[in-house]
Image (tube, coloured by chain):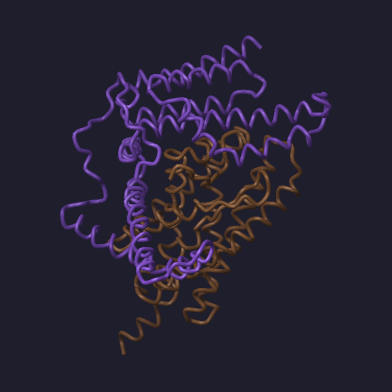
Amino acid sequence: MEPLYLARESRVHRLSPEVKIAAVLLFTIVVVVTPREDLTAFAGYTLLIALVAGLARVPAGWLLKRATIELPFVLLAVVLPFTGHGERVDWLGLSLSVDGLYGAWNIFAKGTLGVLASLLLAATTSMRDLILGLDRLRCPTVITQIMTFMLRYIDVLIDDARRMRIARLSRGYDPRFLWQVKAFAVGVGALFLRSYERGERVYLAMLSRGYSGRMPSGSGSKAPAAEWVVSSALPVAAAGIAVAAAVLA
Amino acid sequence: MDDVQAMHIANGIINGPVSAIFIAIAMAGLAVCVWRAKLDLDDRLAPMAGLVAAFIFAVQMLNFQVLPGVSGHLLGGTLAVILVGPWVGALCVSTVLIVQALVFADGGLTALGLNITNMALIGTAAAYLLVALLLRVLPRSSRGLGATALIASVIGVVVAAMGFVAEFALGGTADLSITAVAATMAGTHTLIGIGEGLIAATTVVTVAKVRPDLVYALRAFRAPIRAKAAVA
């Protein structure tokens, strides 16, 4: 399952997963620690994201559509200018709190930049590579192992749920709308067991073929130093923008 | 799966220092879990842990927008605790959160410490303590097991939601009244907890009837009877 992966040929796609994870993580940290008043810094970060998106050949529309995932939390920000305390400004006949406006901006800007950076990572790195990258970043094997199985089982679950639905339909069970939920609720335990037993057989087959808790890394080798340097450009540029904005202000 | 709408704490909702503290707390908690999970993880538990994580992943996509600005979703901690135990269970929930942050851009990367602390550590710990208590108190039947799953889910989810309220009180960047946030979170999550409890109870009871050997909580808390039967 590759929900957000965008198969393209680009320099960003070819980078090793571990350097991309590290770059996105550091970039996000720089964004989060930036004081909310540094508006120029946030403009600079947006430019950086746009640059990387261009290099990775990820269309802006694709990014923006998927960035709507953060909407539920951004809605929290909308009420802040009205409920905030302190100095107030008038805008279109509404009395808004300056502090509240900054608070709303803070949540919106940092949330959006974080989501965009993560989306770029997901768009340019396949799920298998991400797990490999985490493994190379010394993430404990227990976690990468659970992750590997989880990704496999999601497809098993979806397929088994589809089979059970087809089985119900072929026996003349065709309820409308919400009444489908009842059959699903009754079948959820069975779905779990069926998927488990299917997966258990696969797991035992893997064990008997020498699986030891770690996926074979294949042909790819660890990221060369050059890739670390290239990918560090993103967080370094972001930090540069942050410092410059702080000095100018 | 384009319109996944789950949402955890995003970047910027809680300020930097508090986020950093909770990253440290989450790392410490996870380190303990990894250490203990290695003792638990055998050939039966490894695929089960993966399936539980996949199940939680699927279940967390059900998202409830009860009030503007506050959305909640199922957490799945109780199901994990009953099926794979507290240590592996906490790792399952954390894994789901890490994958959602990296692959679905759901929940901020710097807020990962907060999300893991609430949902994987606080939520599962509360659920585990309740499960440990209730399985000893309630009748040894599938009804007792179902009731355990239901009650532990409701309370576990609300306790996890209170984790967010505590973090918001410590380092919320927004100027909202804490009592209002606490009341909305508690109200929303009680309802979510009931929904989650029903799913957890049905699943656990079915698994316990067909493959009781797969249920960690039964192995841990109801084993004596099976041992006696084996001797006789």
Quadrant for residue B151, please give it.
Answer: bottom right
Residue at 42 percent across and 68 percent down: it is: A189
Residue at 45 percent across and 18 percent down: it is: A51
Give the chain letter for brown: B
- Is B198 above or below relative to A93? below
Chain A, colour shown: purple
Q: Is residue B148 left or right of residue B176?
A: left
Residue B40 visible somewhere in the drawing: no
Residue at 47 percent across and 30 percent down: it is: A63
Residue at 47 percent across and 20 percent down: it is: A50
- Is A92 above or below relative to A240? below
Q: Position of residue B170 (x, y in %)?
A: 67, 41
- Is B18 above or below relative to A105? below
Q: Position of residue B39 (x, y in %)?
A: 35, 58
Label tally: 0
Q: Is residue A183 left or right of residue A245?
A: left
- Is B145 above or below relative to A247? below
Nearer to me, A39 or B117? A39
Q: Position of residue A165 (x, y in %)?
A: 38, 63
Residue B107 visible somewhere in the drawing: yes
Q: Is residue A209 left or right of residue B232?
A: left
Dividing the image into 4 quarters, which one contains the N terminus of chain B?
Answer: top left
Quadrant for residue B49, please give it.
Answer: bottom left
Q: Position of residue B123 (x, y in %)?
A: 55, 56
- Residue furthest toward the top? A248
Dividing the image into 4 quarters, which one contains the C terminus of chain B?
Answer: bottom left
Nearer to me, B79 or A222? B79
